[in-house]
Image (tube, helix red, strand yellow):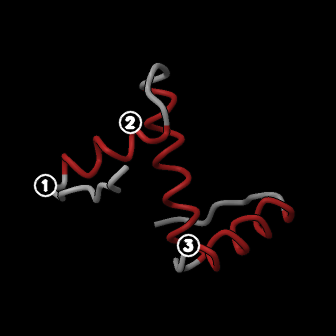
Amino acid sequence: MGIVKIDDSLHEDVRRASTVMCRSINAQAEFWMKIGMLAEANPTLSFNDIVQAQYARADVQSPRVAA
């Protein structure tokens, strides 16, 4: 594990998002990094496609909303 230097305004964005998403600041930053890495590696997938694929990989039934 290491230390990552990020801009103060980005850190503030991570802090605010972590509150909304009920994650620690580190967990929120890690989530954004993971999603960003997956998005770069799979540029044709949407955010929702990436999340669905991660649910499937973890063998989690993704919740569905009835229309």
Residue 51: image location, x then y, percent? 38, 47
Q: Please name the residue that numbered disc 1 is placed on.
A: 59
Amino acid of disc 1? Asp
Percent position of residue 15, x then y: 71, 74
Residue appearing at x 55%, y 67% in the figure: 28
Per the rendering, the mark at residue 49 is 2
- Marks 1/3 in contact by CB < 8 Å: the verdict is no
Please indicate whether residue 19 sits to the left or right of residue 31 in the image: right
Name the side, left or right, on which 54 lies relative to 29: left
45 lies left or right of 65? right
Mark 3 to mark 2 CA distance (whole Å):
19 Å
Question: Which is more N-terminal, label 2 or label 3?
Answer: 3
For the point 76% across and 64% down, which residue is it?
13
Of residue 6 and residue 59, the one placed in the foreground of this image is: 59
Marked residue nearer the N-terminal end (2 or 1): 2
So how many labels did they put on this image? 3
The dot on residue 21 is 3
Q: Quadrant of the N terminus?
A: bottom left
Amino acid, disc 3: Met
Secondary element at tag 1: loop
Q: Within the image, what quadrant is residue 21 found in?
A: bottom right
> Please, what secondary structure does the residue beneath circle 2 have?
helix
Real-space Cα separation, disc 1 to disc 3, in angstroms: 22 Å
Q: Residues within 10 Å of mark 3 (few under 14, many from 20)?
A: few
Indicate the quadrant where residue 45 lies.
top left
